[in-house]
Image (cartoon, rainbow, N blue to C red):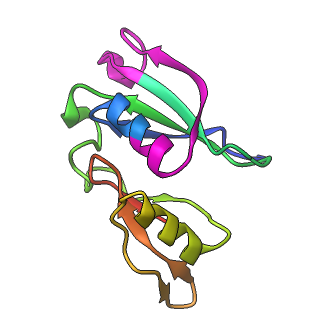
Amino acid sequence: VKAFRAGHLSVSNAARSREFFVKQLGMVETAPVGNLTGAGVGNKGGTMVSLGFPQKQEGEMDLWLTEVKDATASAAGDPGNLYWKIGIIVTDLDCAVAKLRERGVRISDPSQFRDIGYLAHLTDPDGLTIEL
């Protein structure tokens, strides 16, 4: 396996989540918005948005936001339901935190976590954790 194609994230409102990931995190749409009525997501219907970072490198995956109307069928609205976090690698964490704060994003102060890494955390519009 060379790389993953995409990570799926079930959200309660695709338009709201798209706005957050584009305006706050600098992602761009990588494919047109799709309608999932009658397909996928347990045939619950909804909208899917494919996002990525502008200078995507080989091996980096897209984030597919899938709107799910039935919150019981997804992690949307319940961060403890089959969901842990999204991890995003940045080249300069302190700079990224400063830029996000300038955009009005609430984000934790960066801190060293054991010998694993220097990390900061924020949440998306559904309250799901994003780790930088």
Q: Kindly identify the residue that appears in the image at 27 percent across and 42 percent down.
A: 76
Relative placement, left or right, of 2 versus 54 is right
Q: Is residue 95 left or right of residue 1?
A: left
The x, y position of residue 14, in whole percent, is 36, 30
Residue 46 magenta-drawn? yes
Q: Residue 116, located in which quarter of the rendered image?
A: bottom right
Q: Is residue 26 magenta?
A: yes
Image coordinates for residue 79, horizontal then vertical, percent: 27, 54
Residue closest to the eye, 79 or 15: 15
The answer to whether 60 is drawn above or below residue 98 in the figure is above
Determine whether, in the image, residue 107 is placed left or right of residue 75. right
Kindly give the residue lying farthest to the front in the view shown: 102
Q: Residue furthest top?
A: 38
Q: Position of residue 47 (x, y in %)?
A: 39, 21
Residue at the image point whose x is 57% and y is 90% from the top: 115
Q: Residue at x 45, y 50 (%)?
A: 24
Compared with 87, 14 (above or below) is above
- From what the image shows, is residue 32 above or below residue 130? above
Tell me where the magenta segment starts and ends, as one range: 20-47
